Amino acid sequence: MVAHRADFDALPIQDEKDVSYKSTVPGVMHACGHDGHTATLLAVAKVLANRRSISKGILS
């Protein structure tokens, strides 16, 4: 069995960046890369789902 996981949380830090992707919630932001971890995990899930038909195991 192989399991993949990623954490996705925010820190109590005000996002001062002037960019379109800045936090929309005052006083909290994703400041430590967890959103990147989650994006990577979602990409892995998509690749695995696309290969489901050639997998010898169970993908759920």
Image (spheres, rainbow, N blue to C red):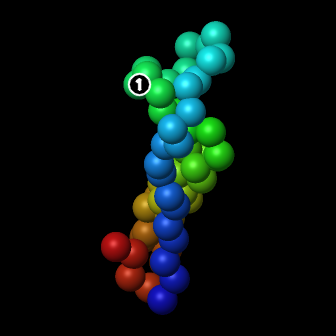
Where is residue 49 drawn, in percent x and y?
A: 44, 61
Kindly state the secondary structure of the residue where label 1 is placed.
loop
User: Image check: 59 left or right of 40?
Assistant: left
Q: Nearer the viewer, residue 54 or 60?
A: 60
Q: Nearer the viewer, residue 51 or 17?
A: 17
**According to the image, label 1 marks what residue?**
25
Where is residue 29 drawn, in percent x and y?
A: 53, 33
Q: Quadrant of the C terminus?
A: bottom left
Quarter-of-image position of residue 16: top right
Q: Nearer the viewer, residue 59 or 35?
A: 35
Q: Residue at x 43, y 69 (%)?
A: 52
Q: Residue at x 39, y 75 (%)?
A: 59
Q: Residue at x 47, y 27 (%)?
A: 27
The answer to whether 28 is drawn above or below residue 8 in the figure is above
Where is residue 45 drawn, in percent x and y?
A: 48, 59
Callout 1 environment at 10 Å: few (<14), some (14 to 19), or many (20+)?
few
The answer to whether 46 is drawn above or below residue 21 in the figure is below
User: Image check: 18 left or right of 53?
Assistant: right
